Image (cartoon, rainbow, N blue to C red):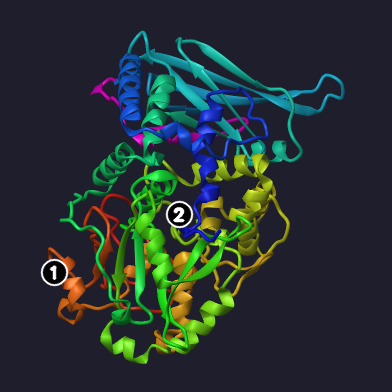
Amino acid sequence: MWRPGSCGLRYLSCSFWILLIILSVQELPVFCISQYSPSLFAYDDEYSALHANMGRIIRVLTKSQLRFSGGENLLESAEDILPKYMGSLIPGKELSWNGTCFHETKASINLTLNGDNNQTDGAVVSVETDSPHSWTCLDLYVFCTPYRITWDFYFLSRHHTLTIKHFFDGELYHIKRKGVQVFLMPAGMIGTLHALWDVFPLFSNTAFGERRNVQFIERHMNTKFQLRDKPWAVTVNEDEISTGTFIVLSKLKGRWGGFETLEKWVTGSFAGHTALCVRDPEGHLWVAEGGVENEKGEEVIGRKRWEEWLDYQVHDSSDPHITLLPLHSSLQAKFDGKKAWQYVCEMDGKPYGYHNMIFSWVDVVSDNYPPPVDAHVVASIMSIWTRMQPDYAANLWVEALNKRLRTTDLDVPEIMRECSKRGITFAQLLTIPERDDWEYSDGKSVTCNVLVMQAYMAAGLFGNLTGKFQATEFTVRDVYMLKIFNDDEKLLPEWCHRAAEVPMPYCQILGRYRMFLPAYNSVPPYENMNERCPSLPPAYQRPAGC
């Protein structure tokens, strides 16, 4: 069965369960919970009440731990599950910092010898904690190398030790040069559980889940949602939809709604998925889309007749929001619909482009990661996931990282060693721009928004700029910011005017809330576009020419 997609975020589900596993086991095994039962969130009222009551219990337990010297910090938001990088422990060097609980924390690492052969084969991490801000607080830490992850928590002011009994191949080399990375869980043990409890509703396909996604976006992206007047579904005359019209979609509940919310937060986009209207030689309107599910359950590039596609969206239980962005009239006139259709047909059925999903977002060393995330956290998650799910990791980033180094078949630990040899950091490696002509093991990597951009290129929309920038460097936000779309609401069809409570240069045809697209149609195309752009929330400031 063909199912419309959501920009192919399925494989990202695993990373949000990693922290749950950390709290469950001392030494991380090679497994990962990738999905949960949809029945967990089946009943809105019961789940909402259960979540509220459990939240109150966890909150009471949390308050005793989350007090800083400057006052109380309840840490009651979803991002508190994210670890904060404190530094790396390298033999012969001492590291110090202020923890959440202990104001004075020092740590070091000493290598140990194997008694049988007198060779270095292990280490002891020493941690000194002092000056707690209360008698009930504790600090929870995660210790990572590309080869392992382990955790410990400290409740008393004293000397603590953590023993690494045996090194994996290559691990000693890494520790001597890059050290053991130390991450603090800012909310502590109970607080982290509380934050995780707050994350779960984002993925609930209920009215309660929708409210939590709306609250998250409003809080973190400095916006305010506005309800639309009914009817929320507009009767559309498809004859008045031009070939080349850009479609942006947004979900606020369900599995994809939760992932789209997180995607929006880190990229600054107010939509989570894209598609393209294109007409065949007989004039029939189709929708081309990346990340759809084919009969085998594989996520691929697909196309569907407009009426079938729209019918599915209208009856989708996750209640998508859909807006049509027509091209500017001057560009519509030069849009080569035959070439766009030919490109879409060539891509039909090809694998979805997971390889470059992350790299269209990460452009600069530090200013793409919402705090407390940074390149150290990303590297650790990549390393962990590579050991747990090597096939998924290869699809998501291992091949792409090898492309950037011009190597083949290196795993993440080997890639980090190669970076060290070349004198570059892993953070710098992540910022190397993606290339449209890179061939991966399953072909060229095309996501939902890349599909749209490359169809526009095929149709000659960018003129002599075609090939001067990389479609694979565009996020959803980058596409709708392009100054190529309609800027005059008077040119829109009558059915679009009837649905618009506020004059807009685009047409929202479905959705409970009004879709605003900040910075819509504002950036003219230019060479090497979107290769060096920061995206820090909540302002998401974009320097000219980045």
Question: Disc 2 to disc 1, how far (Cα)?
Answer: 39 Å
Task: Please name the residue shown 23% across and 53% down the image.
Answer: 513
Residue 62 image label: none
Q: Amino acid at mark 1?
A: Pro
Residue farthest to the right? Answer: 117
Q: Is residue 410 magenta?
A: no
Is residue 543 visible in the rendered image? The answer is no
Is residue 67 visible in the rendered image? The answer is yes
Q: Nearer the viewer, mark 2 or mark 1?
A: 1
Task: Please name the residue shown 32% across and 86% down the image.
Answer: 332
Quarter of the figure with residue 345: bottom right
Residue 352 in the image, given as x and y percentages of width and height: 56, 63
Task: Please name the residue shown 47% across and 58% down the image.
Answer: 5
Picture layout, residue 166 above or below residue 417: above
How many callouts does the rendering have?
Answer: 2
Quarter of the figure with residue 98: top left
Residue 405 in the image, given as x and y percentages of width and height: 64, 62
Q: Is residue 445 left or right of residue 170?
A: left
Residue farthest to the bottom? Answer: 334
Q: Is residue 32 left or right of residue 251?
A: right
Residue topped by disc 1: 503
Q: Is residue 83 magenta?
A: yes
Residue 466 in the image, given as x and y percentages of width and height: 46, 84
Residue topped by disc 2: 365
Q: Which residues are magenta?
A: 68-93
- Residues under numbered marks 2 and 1 in contact, where contact means CB atoms less than 8 Å apart: no
Q: Amino acid at mark 2?
A: Val
